[in-house]
Amino acid sequence: MGINICGAPCCWGVDDITNPNLPTWQRVMREAHEAGYRAIELGPNGWIPTDDVETVIEELNKNELSIVAGTIFDDMLSEENYEKLLKQVDGICNLITKLPSLPVEDGQRRPTPYMTIMDWGHDERDFAAGHSDKAPRLSDKDWNQMMKHFKGLSERAKSYGVRPVLHPHCGGYIEFGDEIDRLAEDIPNDLAGFVLDTGHLQYAGLDPVEWLRKYKDRLDYVHFKDIDPKVYDEIMKEHIRFFDGCARGSMCPIGQGMIDYNAVADVLEEINYNGYITIEQECDPRNVENSLPNVKASVDFLKSIGYKI
């Protein structure tokens, strides 16, 4: 397989930039190098500084890393938030286009770095993560407004030569099958591709293999995560936020959960996916001492079934 495995700061509990318990980005880069990664994601906006390119390059070079993708993880619906999101895109793209680049694999649809765009920040959906029957859907008016924002952010990233990839995420307004299908209809492939996440698909009650196959022609980038079935069954019976469930251990190392990664490997080969895949395991940053062992366990499992770093 022409697939390379990368890492994400969320494996060290880095999701919410306001969390006082986050590890330093220097520590995460050091441990990502120890895990054998050649690339990681940028993480939430502002955690790795976007205004100090030389320092970031120095740290990347020291740890033999590149950045595979930047991330917009925010309220995509609010009109009042939109200008702030555009500024985030500017800061991230200004940085990632100046960093050491990754090689392009034969058959890779689009070169890195990517701009991953996700909707987040709505209590009514956060508490309904994984529950399609309980999750309120947007009105046509609100949906169209969110699509306008997705398009605007994608166009801004594209102006820097960065490929935007849209990411369905549990607890946001793009999570379930009807929403993914509608997103695909409303945002053309020439403007933005998809990054599908095996764990978010499974959590939302969707078959990752089926959905990777379904959107093979939109699939520029892939995220891997796995779900502990015991914890998942417990939190599905509770009124709980998505990341509170993660703090309880809903996500586990790849190969130790409910997703059949041999079947995932088979479908990626079937659809001729080549390029980059990023491991994610959302967790509580107060448990950061477990992060490197968990990352290594995921890497070791994926290498054992044919993937490369």
Image: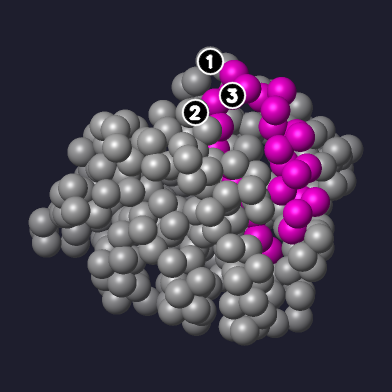
Of badges 3 and 1, the one in the foreground is 3
Crowd rating for badge 3 (residues with CA inside 10 Å; few <14, some 14–19, many 20+): many
Of badges 2 and 1, the one in the foreground is 2
Q: Does residue 4 appear left or right of residue 191 in this picture?
A: right
Against 189, is 73 above or below?
above
Q: Does residue 36 appear left or right of residue 172 in this picture?
A: right
Which of 164/287 is in front? 287
Against 257, is 5 above or below?
below
Against 87, is 212 above or below?
below
Give percent across and percent down for residue 112: 66, 63
Residue type pointed to by label 1: Pro
Please give the name of the residue rendered at 68% of the width and 64% of the height, measured from the top-left corner. Answer: 276
Quadrant in the picture for the N terminus: bottom right
Q: Which residues are magenta?
A: 276-302
Which of 10/225 is in front? 225
Please give the name of the residue rendered at 34% of the width and 33% of the height, measured from the top-left corner. Answer: 241
Q: Quick one: label 2 or label 3, which is nearer the N terminus?
A: 2
Task: Residue under label 1, please give it.
Answer: 20
Q: Quick one: label 3 or label 1, which is nearer the N terminus?
A: 1
Q: Secondary structure at mark 2?
A: helix
Task: Residue under label 3, please give it.
Answer: 285
Q: CA distance from mark 3 to mark 1?
A: 9 Å
Question: From this viewpoint, which residue is outermost toward the top?
Answer: 20
Q: Are marks 2 and 3 in contact (CB under 8 Å)?
A: no
Q: Does residue 111 appear left or right of residue 4 in this picture?
A: left
In magenta stretch: residue 287: yes
Against 300, is 194 above or below?
below
Give percent across and percent down for residue 137: 17, 54
Q: Are marks 3 and 1 in contact (CB under 8 Å)?
A: no
Task: Residue under label 2, please give it.
Answer: 247
Residue type pointed to by label 2: Ala
